[in-house]
């Protein structure tokens, strides 16, 4: 069973020079320590060290939930051993995105007889394998799966359908037009749908979104409380989601309290959706709402919908005016302390009066924002990006000063032009700022000598920024974890759900003054985890990035796009200094024309020992083959390396093949 010598050795290891033995700690303390160790290491390694740890590692508090999501070192053999060892003890199993595991690995899940929650999103799963597995999981109440081409619900056994009939929560990602397992889930309370269907098959055939209406099982939605649908671009996705909605429009569940549909671009309202919204206005009282912009724009929908204790509102890209926001959303200043998340991204008129003649660059109405802040004082997530929110000269009414009252904010997204101090003359921006803004395109590049930052430049930037309204805002939000500063006119060269635009618009006049000192102010956010900076034209040296690297030690995700001059990467030296301090960084995305991914860059990036995903998008950019290979050899945690550069196709293929061989 156990080697006595091994147990003695482990005890000696647990004892330091002061005579403190780790094994003398109480079980409660040891269990807390072991909770930071992955379940696979606990079962396959740690429990083999000594008898005491062998017992503790099998404690229910450690084996109740098993997370294999993003555990890239776990292979099929480790999964098999894990299921054999503690399969009956597992109640929640997350294998989402374990694409590297063979499909037959999922067969071992059958050993987990007491599973209550199972996530297999992104795993290879056939109808027969799903049927066999679910037939043995009689206690399952939450399921997440993918529905791929070839899925056949008729292959599901009666035992499998019996298990599905008891499922209360279903997350289903559709890669083919189908109802999936929804018709079998007769007790659903929460339905999450992700539509990723292509308009054409791999053979180039045009797909149809038509489904058998008789398979939808109308009565089975009557327990539904949460309905969420996220659509990728494509006409077929819209066709299929309308069929799901047709069922709800015939008989809207009375207990429905969250209705959310996220659709990119235009999603025209149909007779079915109008009937559904009318039925919702009559029969339900919502707590969370998100609709396509075309369903809200120009309609009196918000005037008729009833809300109880709302916690989430999303009006992204809607033509929602300030008057509508105050009167219909927060009911003229009604106390909305329950609201924790508000998305007003792309709502260009939401902080302005109802004037139809307002220009995008006109000042906001600070009284509207003040009413919002007072009414929704417990907001944790706020998105005001993709719009021009220019503050007026009213004393104490700057957008940053008003937002500083939201002490509970954890994530914040703002347009770059909203964080500037009110200038004395916005018609003529500083000459220095204008000279450093080179519009994207094919024009002649302007060569400007930009001095590298000095060591005392960080202190100068901090002193300058401490007097700004942006510094004051961040000073009052010490627990902020997610921050986005994106130019109002910014458009990515490779967007996820929007059409690609080759030439983005130039930054607005107020954004041209945002530069290194404002970026340095971000360094005071000690708990910052995710940061996005896009289209900051006045970046001269990037010195503020070093301040972030030194002070934001919890930074996990960093996205930088179009900083400074478009014809030259002026912040390269500062970025390399920053990366040397980012020990917890996992995701890095850089989008910048003429970016040179050279040896010095990858040497600095090699200091990011936790890095898992790298994406570089650079028109006319270059890379060094040997530098990439050296980086991949040093950073063993990297599982995704995407580089869209200006190199030839031959170089890219050779690099890809070399990485895969190693």
Image: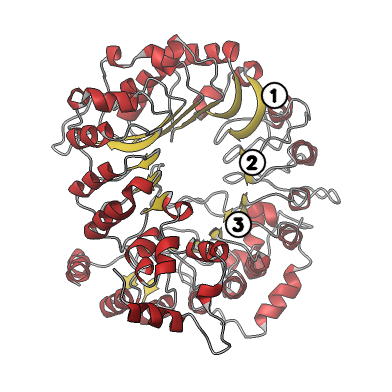
Q: Quadrant of the C terminus?
A: bottom left
**What residue would you read off at disc 3?**
481
**What residue would you read off at disc 1?**
328
So how many labels did they put on this image? Answer: 3
Q: Is mark 3 on a helix, strand or loop?
A: loop
Task: Tell which circle, 3 or 2, labels the residue nearer the N-terminal end.
Answer: 2
Work out whether residue 129 or residue 11 is closer to the camera in this orientation and state it.
11
| Contact, mark 3 vs mark 2 (Cβ under 8 Å) | no
Q: Distance between the residues labelled 2 and 1?
A: 23 Å
Q: Residue 360 carries which label?
A: 2
From the viewer's perspective, is the residue at label 3 or at label 2 nearer?
3
Q: Which residue is drawn at 18% across and 47% down?
A: 104
Q: Which residue is drawn at 29% across and 38% down?
A: 146
Q: In which quarter of the image is residue 70?
A: bottom left
From the viewer's perspective, is the residue at label 2 or at label 1 nearer?
1
The local crowd at label 2, few if under 14, some if 14 to 19, many if 20 or more residues have their Cα within 10 Å, is: some
Q: Which residue is drawn at 34% across and 78% down?
A: 4
* Looking at the image, residue 423 lies above or below residue 208: below
Q: How far apart are marks 3 and 2 (CA)?
A: 29 Å
Left or right side of 239 for 649: left
Q: Position of residue 279 (x, y in %)?
A: 53, 11
* Looking at the image, residue 204 lies above or below residue 41: above
| Contact, mark 2 vs mark 1 (Cβ under 8 Å) | no
């Amino acid at each position: 069973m156990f080697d006595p010598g091994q147990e003695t050795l482990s005890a000696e290891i647990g004892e330091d020079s002061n005579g403190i033995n780790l094994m003398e700690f109480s079980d409660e303390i040891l269990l807390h320590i072991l909770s930071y160790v992955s379940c696979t290491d606990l079962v396959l390694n740690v429990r083999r060290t000594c008898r005491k740890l062998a017992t503790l590692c099998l404690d229910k508090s450690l084996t109740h939930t098993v997370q294999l999501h993003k555990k890239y070192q776990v292979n099929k053999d480790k999964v098999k051993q894990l299921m054999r060892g503690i399969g009956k003890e597992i109640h929640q199993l997350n294998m989402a995105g374990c694409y590297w595991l063979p499909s037959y690995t999922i067969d071992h899940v059958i050993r987990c007889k007491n599973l209550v929650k199972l996530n297999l999103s992104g795993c290879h799963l056939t109808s027969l394998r799903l049927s066999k597995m679910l037939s043995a999981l009689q206690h399952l109440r939450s399921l997440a799966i993918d529905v791929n081409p070839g899925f056949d619900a008729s292959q599901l056994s009666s035992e499998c359908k019996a298990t599905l009939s008891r499922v209360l929560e279903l997350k289903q990602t559709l890669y083919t037009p189908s109802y999936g397992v929804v018709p079998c889930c007769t007790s659903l309370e929460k339905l999450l749908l992700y539509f990723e269907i292509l308009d054409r098959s791999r053979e180039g055939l045009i797909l149809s979104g038509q489904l058998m209406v008789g398979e939808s099982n109308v009565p089975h939605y009557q327990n539904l409380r949460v309905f969420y649908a996220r659509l990728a671009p494509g006409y077929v996705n819209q066709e299929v989601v309308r069929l799901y909605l047709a069922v709800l429009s015939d008989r809207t569940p009375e207990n429905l309290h969250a209705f959310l549909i996220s659709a990119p671009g235009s999603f025209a309202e149909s007779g079915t959706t109008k009937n559904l919204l009318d039925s919702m206005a009559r029969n339900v009282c919502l707590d969370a709402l998100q609709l396509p912009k075309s369903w809200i724009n120009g309609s009196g929908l918000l005037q008729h919908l009833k809300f109880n204790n709302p916690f989430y509102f999303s009006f992204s890209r809607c033509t929602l005016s300030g008057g509508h926001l105050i009167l219909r959303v927060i009911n003229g200043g009604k106390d909305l302390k329950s609201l924790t998340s508000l998305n007003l991204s792309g709502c260009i008129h939401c902080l302005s009066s109802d004037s139809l003649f307002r220009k995008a660059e006109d000042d906001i109405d600070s009284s509207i924002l003040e009413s919002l802040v007072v009414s929704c004082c417990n907001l944790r997530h706020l998105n005001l990006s993709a719009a021009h929110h220019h503050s007026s000269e009213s004393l104490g009414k700057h957008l940053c000063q008003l937002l500083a009252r939201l002490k509970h904010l954890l994530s914040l997204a703002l347009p770059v032009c909203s964080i500037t101090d009110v200038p004395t003359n916005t018609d003529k921006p500083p000459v220095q700022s204008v000279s450093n803004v080179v519009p994207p395109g094919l024009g002649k590049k302007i060569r400007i000598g930009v001095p590298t930052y000095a060591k005392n430049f960080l202190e100068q930037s901090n002193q300058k920024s401490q007097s700004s309204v942006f510094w004051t805002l961040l000073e009052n939000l010490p627990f902020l974890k997610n921050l986005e500063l994106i130019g109002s006119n910014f458009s990515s060269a490779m967007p996820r759900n929007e059409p690609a635009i080759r030439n983005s618009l130039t930054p607005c006049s107020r954004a041209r003054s945002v530069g290194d000192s404002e970026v340095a102010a971000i360094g005071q956010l000690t708990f910052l985890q995710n940061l996005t900076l896009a289209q900051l034209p006045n970046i001269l040296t990037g010195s503020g990035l070093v301040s972030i690297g030194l002070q934001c030690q919890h930074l996990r995700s960093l996205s930088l796009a179009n900083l400074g001059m478009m014809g030259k990467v002026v912040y390269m030296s500062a970025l390399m200094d920053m990366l040397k301090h980012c020990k917890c960084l996992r995701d890095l995305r850089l989008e910048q024309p003429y970016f040179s991914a050279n040896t010095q860059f990858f040497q600095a990036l090699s200091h990011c020992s936790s890095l898992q995903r790298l994406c570089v998008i650079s028109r006319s950019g270059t890379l060094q083959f040997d530098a990439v290979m050296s980086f991949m050899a040093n950073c063993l945690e990297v599982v995704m390396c995407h580089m869209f550069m200006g190199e030839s196709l031959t170089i890219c293929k050779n690099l890809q093949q070399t990485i895969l061989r190693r």
